[in-house]
Amino acid sequence: MLNQTPIWKYITVIFMLGLCALYALPNLYGEDHAVQISSGRDTAVTLSMVDDVRNSLETANIPFKAVEFADERILVRLPDSDTQLVARENLDKKLGDEYFVAMNLAPDTPDWLENLGGTPMKLGLDLRGGVHFLMEVDMNSAIDSAVGGIVDEFRDRLREEGLRYRTVRKTGNSVEVVFRAPDVLESAQFFLRNNYPDMVIDERDDLTLRASFTEVRLAEIRDYAVKQNITIIRNRVNQLGVAEPLVQKQGAERIVVQLPGIQDTAKAKEILNATATLNFRLVDETGDVRDAVAGRVPAGSELLYTRDGQPILLKSQIMLEGSHIIDAGNSMDENGFPQVNINLDSQGGSRMSQVSRDNVGKPMATVFIEFKATDERDAEGKLIFEKNEEIINVATIQTQLGSSFRITGIDSAGEARDLALLLRAGALIAPIQIVEERTVGPSLGKENIELGMQAITYGLIAVLLFMLVYYQAFGVVANFALLANVIMIAGIMSMIPGATLTLPGMAGIVLTVGMAVDANVLIFERIREELREGRSPQQAIHFGYDNAFSTILDANITTFIAGMILFAVGTGPIKGFSITLMIGIVTSMFTAIIVTRVLVNLIWGGKRVKKLAI
């Protein structure tokens, strides 16, 4: 007989609705005000600190729900925002500057649901509150660093080819190579042009070649600087415990950072502004450190200091930039002493192999470089950065190094761990500065949520009443599918790691509610047409669903394509709207066509029905 559903379809519908309902459930539990303690630059959070934190709060008579340790972080759950502020001040005073103590919001999901992977929907800045930063990358430093790398590379490559030169120097954004004879210059020009197609090599009258990057290569350097900084900023944001931060490129030189739920703007700025990089240099063993301290630094060398204030004379030439490090870990060597194992990318491995081959047995220093913004600005109105350099480790090169090598001569396992963490976090390719800062208070986010939920609720109630009155019993079926659609959207949004609900996203949910009921309206009107043409109720249901399907599919596919385009070219709120729109289209198709068909077949299918309540 017509309109009978096979058992596998019942099982599929029940499974899908049950799964989405399960993962939508965490959204009902809300969030706790929390204080999070994260590792500092030279310190690490350990399990043993949990008791100290708990005792500190109890001594100060500060009530708390729980103190948890996970992912090398301590999370203190508190009953309200006032207690959260007092607890933050207490812990900040106790721990000092060695750890990051930040306020945020933590989901209050039950353990059994968390063990199943259940998490609430990630709310955007406009709903949850938090901070918004617009950061600008210092492209002059990025290009300067790239040119400096080429200077060192030219020296090595020309020496390998036996092409004698007087000097290789950096002048502005170009490299000048001065030769001893015209024939050597000619050979060098041929060699450089063949091996460096992304550089313009020009000959000058005074036995000098000038090499500068092409516009295409300069664009690549700028783009790489932004992408590298985005990666490192994401790593730093993890210290704040933000569930779903937004870190994305805006324009050619800027990065947008949105941290929903963060209530401590000062701490966020402190972490993001810590622009730093690393490099490796050889120690100058021939120069006199005492003369250098007195102001007589040898040519080609530079005087730097360790964290303990010990002066060390280094060669100015950089062996390797820290941006080539892709992984680092600490362990013990064959003698039981701590060491740091480093892995480089292919370009860095080739560079390290060439330089270390001729310097076996010589000491190599790891230099930590930090850029701090001053109050001064250049002619273009951009902040001027002050460069601070510090030697964090000196080790001896034991053998020719490649893509993987180790740093030894480290005093303790703790120092090795901290150095590995620092190297693994990566190095910013160029300094960054915050050019715009906005704070969205929790009260504003709460108001946006309430208004958005009111819009969804009122729209849903209006549609439910209309369907119930106009389509009677079939309206009840459509209403069930409509509610299932909303639950499925919430469940899928909670399951997708990168999905974030924003205020425009709530508008997308309202829109998909209307689209879902629109599909049912098309189906029910076709059933009415079939009944008016004299078909039996079973035939009307069968042909009504079949004939309306192509129209519904065409309309939803075109809308889905529009959503994909919005997601591909849009940013921020546009992406939030497009995500909920596309998810809503898929769920509305499922509920409006499959779920309602299963329910209709369950109620009326395979029976002798004389009249339909539609």
Image: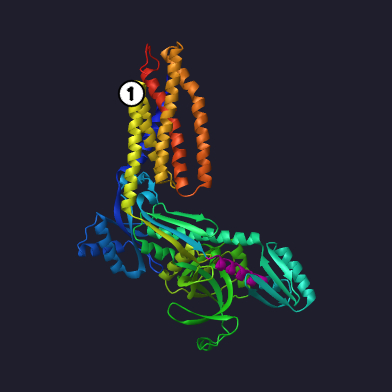
| Residue 519 lies in quadrant | top left
Dividing the image into 4 quarters, which one contains the N terminus? top left
Which residue corresponds to the image point at 27% horizontal and 61% vertical from the top-left? 85
Q: Name which residue type carries label 1.
A: Val
The reply, left or right, for residue 610 in relation to residue 552 is left
The correct choice, above or below, for 358 with respect to 48 in the image is below
| Residue 399 lies in quadrant | bottom right
Element carrying mark 1: helix
Q: Which residues are magenta?
A: 138-154
Q: Give percent across and percent down for residue 198.
A: 68, 62
Q: Give percent across and percent down for residue 444.
A: 33, 51
Dividing the image into 4 quarters, which one contains the C terminus? top left
Which residue corresponds to the image point at 30% horizontal and 56% vertical from the top-left? 34
Q: Give percent across and percent down for residue 156.
A: 67, 72
Q: Along the line of sight, which residue is nearer the eye, 583 or 112?
A: 583
**Residue 503 shown in magenta:** no
The correct choice, above or below, for 261 with respect to 101 in the image is above
The reply, left or right, for residue 102 in relation to residue 574 is left
Q: Along the line of sight, which residue is nearer the eye, 285 or 548?
A: 548
The residue where tag 1 is placed is 469
**Residue 141 shown in magenta:** yes
Looking at the magenta stretch, what is its main secondary structure?
helix
- Asked if residue 338 can be seen in this view, the reply is yes
* Dot 1 crowding, Cα within 10 Å, few <14, some 14–19, many 20+: few
- Asked if residue 12 can be seen in this view, the reply is no
The correct choice, above or below, for 74 with respect to 292 in the image is above
Question: In the current view of this chain or complex, which residue is farthest to the right?
Answer: 183
The reply, left or right, for residue 78 in relation to residue 70 is left
Q: Along the line of sight, which residue is nearer the eye, 335 or 304?
A: 304
